Image (tube, rainbow, N blue to C red):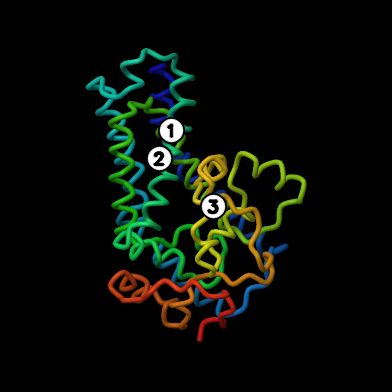
């Protein structure tokens, strides 16, 4: 379906802008109107510095990664590489398989960032945020984006997904990252039904708990089925969503809200804490 791929390539920039600016704008209004949690601490300082890091990622990595992934998909298509290109599968079947397999790959990469000490040093920049809202969804160290991007390119080379599937995937991940981290409340029935397949805000919030056993759960990016399948699913935080502590116990000082400390965080020594989660807000 060359026409579909061409259409999505032509409108890729617009799709990414809608996925980022459109979704973020709606979620910011939703958070202001009815937040899931009443966070304590310096919201303005967090937003300013999370926004600065997001801007850096936009310039350096986060907007580059989708382009690299799409470029990789184009090269793979032209060379006829990958399982799906060789299988001769129908276009829409290949798109569906690609979206599922790339999400499974992202789940595995996410687990690696928690399980490999060197990768965890990068990923803890994301988890060190002492509150959780839409700005947290883009608080990543630029080097983490770069490393994750390389894993994504490798997966594309092996799988051989349609180019259109990669465009859809990148826009979907950006939009869903905003929703999953948002400080919003879904109606209980909607959350109960959606979480059977998708990562909802309540599902992902558990992953940002200060308790290590909860941090090391709910690794899904878009689909929650992988956590259920591989035994890493945690339905609710032990202290409840309103009382749970967000962040990392070892990085509670106010200075870690500042962008230059976020960038330096991978270089700092710290042992992962596994205590009760009863920790103070940033000092």
**Residue that appears at 41% across and 14% down:** 89
Please state which of the two labelled residues, at mark 1 or mark 3, is closer to the viewer. Answer: 3
Q: What element carries label 3?
A: loop
Residue sitting nearer the eye, 180 or 274: 274
148 to the left or right of 97: left
Task: Tell me if label 3 and label 2 are in contact, CB under 8 Å.
Answer: no
Residue under pointer 1: 101
What is the crowding at mark 2: few (fewer than 14 residues within 10 Å), some, or many (at least 20)?
some
What is the crowding at mark 3: few (fewer than 14 residues within 10 Å), some, or many (at least 20)?
many
* Image position of 121 with respect to 256: above or below: above
Residue under pointer 2: 105
**Residue that appears at 42% across and 36% down:** 102
**Residue that appears at 38% across and 18% down:** 2
* Image position of 246 with respect to 279: above or below: above
**Residue that appears at 69% across and 69% down:** 242
Q: What element carries label 1?
A: helix
What is the crowding at mark 1: few (fewer than 14 residues within 10 Å), some, or many (at least 20)?
some
- Between disc 3 and disc 2, whose residue precedes? 2
The quadrant of the picture occupied by the N terminus is top left
Task: Tell me if label 2 and label 1 are in contact, CB under 8 Å.
Answer: yes
Residue under pointer 3: 218
What's the distance in space between the residues labelled 1 and 3, CA to CA? 17 Å
What's the distance in space between the residues labelled 2 and 1, CA to CA? 6 Å
Residue 201: x %, y % from top left: 62, 54
Q: Looking at the image, which residue sits at the far left?
A: 79
């Amino acid at each position: 379906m060359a026409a579909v791929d061409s259409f999505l390539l032509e409108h890729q920039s617009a799709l990414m802008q809608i996925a980022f600016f459109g979704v973020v704008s709606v979620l910011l209004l939703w958070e202001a109107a009815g937040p899931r949690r009443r966070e304590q601490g310096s919201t303005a300082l967090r937003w300013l510095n999370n926004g600065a890091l997001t801007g850096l990622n936009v310039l350096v990595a986060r907007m580059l990664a989708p382009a690299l992934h799409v470029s990789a998909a184009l090269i793979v298509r032209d060379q006829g590489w990958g399982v799906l290109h060789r299988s001769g599968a129908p276009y829409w079947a290949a798109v569906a398989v690609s979206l599922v397999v790339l999400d499974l790959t992202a789940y595995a990469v996410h687990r690696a960032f928690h399980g490999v000490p060197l990768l965890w040093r990068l990923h803890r920049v994301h988890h060190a945020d002492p509150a959780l809202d839409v700005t947290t969804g883009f608080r990543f160290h630029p080097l983490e984006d770069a490393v994750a991007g390389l894993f994504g390119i490798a997966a594309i080379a092996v799988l051989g997904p349609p180019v259109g599937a990669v465009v859809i995937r990148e826009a979907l991940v950006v939009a869903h990252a905003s929703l999953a981290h948002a400080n919003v409340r879904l109606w209980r029935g909607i959350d109960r039904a959606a979480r059977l397949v998708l990562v909802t805000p309540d599902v992902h919030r558990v992953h940002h708990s200060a308790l290590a056993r909860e941090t090391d759960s709910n690794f899904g990016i878009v689909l929650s089925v992988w956590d259920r399948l591989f035994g890493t699913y945690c339905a609710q935080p032990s202290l409840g969503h309103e009382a749970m502590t967000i962040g990392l116990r070892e990085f509670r000082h106010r200075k870690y809200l500042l962008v230059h400390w976020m960038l330096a965080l991978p270089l700092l020594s710290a042992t992962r804490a596994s205590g009760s989660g009863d920790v103070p807000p940033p000092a």
